[in-house]
Image (cartoon, rainbow, N blue to C red):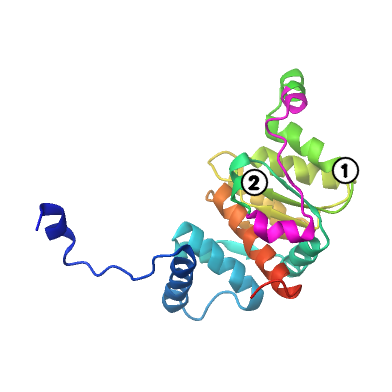
Amino acid sequence: MNEQQKNTSSFRLHEASTPTDIERASMAIIEAEAPTPRPFSGRAWIVARRLVHTSADFDILNTLHFHPDAVTRGVEAIRNGATLITDTEMARAGMTRRRLDPFGVRVVCFMSDPEVAEVARMEGITRARAAMDRAMALPGPKIIAIGNAPTALLRLLECVDAGAPPPELVVGMPVGFVNAAESKDLLMASTLSFITVAGRKGGSNLAAAAINALAEMALEDAGLTG
């Protein structure tokens, strides 16, 4: 037995090996170890559980907040083929196409758009802010998922305050030390339908995970799972 085998021989590894088995086992562990009473129930718990799965952090349950109609509106918007706008390519890549394609959901990110970059340069603003202006100008129903830039969320709130049609749902999870917590506080004080994580924590992975949970429920409602 080599040294590595000696070091690992006392550990009992889980038998799950396929992606499906690993996810199923992970969810079972979360169900078993989640604090009781759970802070969320029903479909809100499905979203919350997915965020715990993505972050491997039960503490997120203490900072996660839902508008009362957030899950319902998010699922309906996906089923109706709403455009999904995000502030990072990472979040866009994390939104599983097999869950969104059946509904014709288009996922866009304008952060790398040359016109957005030029506007940001000319006006001396962040690309995230300029990209949000571009996003809010799109026609039709929208879901906006922000996992990185507080300036994107702040600009979204400004646009709605100025009379722009509100998105069906805002997944507001910008991360960082400058205006991340404050932007999410403003979101929770607004009239928008939202899912958010209070404080400085957040991230593109969490924003994508919330969307994936909603999309999975949309598939279930449409009878497209199983």
- Left/right of residue 89 with respect to residue 142 in the rendered view: left
Q: Magenta residues, as a range?
A: 96-117
User: x, y (%) of residue 162?
Assistant: 88, 43
Give the residue displayed 78% in from the left and 65% down from the top: 73
With respect to residue 38, does 91 lie above or below? above
Question: 158 or 108, which lies in front?
Answer: 108
- Number of callouts in the render? 2
In the rendered image, which quarter contains the C terminus? bottom right
Residue 117, numbered label = none
Residue 162, numbered label = 1
Question: For numbered disc 1, what is the local secondary structure?
Answer: loop
Toward the bottom, the furthest residue is 37
User: x, y (%) of residue 213?
Assistant: 63, 64
Q: Which residue in the structure is indicated by mark 2? A: 92
Give how far apart the Cα atoms at labels 1 and 2 are.
Answer: 27 Å
Question: For numbered disc 2, what is the local secondary structure?
Answer: helix
Disc 1 versus disc 2: nearer the observer? 2
- Left/right of residue 163 with respect to residue 217 in the rendered view: right
Give the residue displayed 54% in from the left and 42% down from the top: 176
Q: Please state which amino acid type lies under the numbered disc 1.
A: Ala
- Left/right of residue 188 with respect to residue 148 in the rendered view: right
In the rendered image, which quarter contains the N terminus? bottom left
User: x, y (%) of residue 217?
Assistant: 68, 70
- Left/right of residue 63 with respect to residue 82 in the rendered view: left
Give the residue displayed 79% in from the left and 64% down from the top: 79
With respect to residue 184, does 12 lie above or below? below
Q: Does residue 75 show up?
A: yes
Q: Please state which amino acid type lies under the numbered disc 2.
A: Arg
